[in-house]
Amino acid sequence: MLDKRDLQKCIHCGLCLQACPTYLTTGQEAESPRGRIYLMRQAVEGRIRWAQARPHLDACMGCLGCQTACPSGVPYAKLIEAARAEVETQARTPLQRWVRQQAISNFTQPARLRLLLQLAGALGLRRAPRWVARLLGASDSVMRLPRLPERAWRPKQTVYPARGVPKARVGLLLGCAMQVLFDRVHAATVGMLTLAGYEVHLPRAQGCCGALWVHNGYPARACRNARRLFMAFREVDYIAVNAAGCGSTMKEYGLLFHGTPEQAEAERFAQRVRDVHELLADAPLPEPARRDSLCVTYHDACHLVHGQGIREQPRALLKRLPNLKLIEMEGAELCCGSAGIYNLLQPHLARDALQRKIAHIKATGATVVASANPGCTLWIRQGLEEAGLPVEVLHPVEILAKAYDAMP
Ligand code: SF4
Ligand code: SF4
């Protein structure tokens, strides 16, 4: 439910405009945070229909760059999620809703995602077919279908003991796309957390955290996912997350369940959620085992930097590696355009944001981009390949696990 008081916090100062990738591309007020907040306010007050606001709300990347830039404390994440729920119920047909729900289901169910990617591989499909994009309301299909990893890492046990005296029990969120496409990031996370003294649990009955559902206007579906996580992680001290979008959503479960009998339980759960960098930055680590020379630039995933306020910890961890040179890119905090399934739904704005990101990466001369979100990693990899740049994209924990020789 949109709260008018949150909308009224916007004083129209415009300090958020330069932090907004869609405003930078279009230069249009309606594609800026200030314009979108004004449209939401008009729709809430009944001066326009939600259908009139819809194209501009759909074009928002949900990157939250504006929330960080805003001096007035406008809670943009809360506003856009509530506005999207209004759009889904009031400004889409039942068929449009069904198609969008199917798309989200395909991304958030590991078995289904794996099967679809296997099928696409067997048929030689590199991109989602254009008719799929059209069904989703997109004009084109530019997002490449990811390839399944050749040698998947399958955990051999459900508990990995800490090296040394355990300081806490940590449950690792396996997620959906992460589990299918980034199993090596999970392996690296297990390796680094155990090295840092945590006992790592991998509960089997987890499922998706609900981030894609809540970001696309389906909070009730997200609640269903969250309840499963409450059960799965009831016996650990912390829940570790290595995907920015998931961690950001899980830290906001209190808001998701606001005003319901489950709010207190959701808040207690949220207080135990930690991004993997937070856990590692707080722990003493031994000297790295390897001293490989690396030239790295760090991309701030939106839901890590703007959603969770995590900027320093990943950089500080990388800087502990003796021969790693960290070069800051311009616009590190600007969205790359991946934004969940945004690059599927808004291909042109997403591509423009990607090109800006690739230009900034190129200017650093780095040979590795560190990125802590699966969507960003896939999208930036695609941009680098298309630009012919021989640059790897790795999660910071992959870089760390290699240097500390910590892969399980
Ligand atoms: S969330 Fe990102 S794209 Fe949306 S209005 Fe804010 S800065 Fe712009
Ligand atoms: S910076 Fe904040 S108060 Fe200023 S226009 Fe943007 S959202 Fe409104």
Image: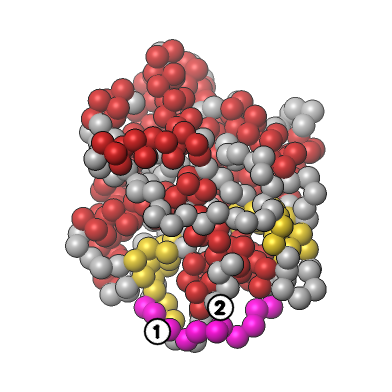
Looking at the picture, the colour scheme in use is secondary structure
**Quarter of the image where the N terminus is located:** top right
User: Is residue 385 visible from the viewing direction of this image?
Assistant: yes
Q: Nearer the viewer, residue 217 or 340?
A: 340
Q: Relative to 73, is 53 on the left or the right?
A: left
Q: Is residue 305 above or below residue 313?
A: above
Q: Nearer the viewer, residue 337 or 344?
A: 344
Q: Nearer the viewer, residue 119 or 235?
A: 119
**Quarter of the image where the C terminus is located:** bottom right
User: Is residue 335 visible from the viewing direction of this image?
Assistant: no
Secondary structure beneath disc 2?
loop
Q: Residue 194, position in %: x, y?
A: 67, 68
Q: Residue 40, position in %: x, y?
A: 47, 28
Answer few, some or many: residues within 10 Å of disc 1's Cα (few below 14, many 20 plus, some between 14 and 19). few
Q: Main secondary structure of the magenta part?
A: loop
Answer few, some or many: residues within 10 Å of disc 2's Cα (few below 14, many 20 plus, some between 14 and 19). many
The amino acid marked with disc number 2 is Tyr
Which mark identifies residue 58? Answer: none
Q: Residue 123, position in %: x, y?
A: 26, 36
* Residue 366 falls within the magenta-colored stretch: no
Q: Earlier in the sequence, mark 2 or mark 1?
A: 1
Specify the quadrant of the image occupied by residue 107: top left
Q: Residue at x 34, y 35 (%)?
A: 119
Question: Label 2 vs label 1: CA separation?
Answer: 14 Å
Q: Which residue is mark 1?
A: 293
Q: Residue at x 78, y 38 (%)?
A: 265
Secondary structure beneath disc 1?
loop
Q: Which residue is mark 2?
A: 404
Question: Which contiguous range is marked in magenta?
Answer: 284-295
Q: Relative to 207, is 302 on the left or the right?
A: left
Q: Residue at x 54, y 27 (%)?
A: 218
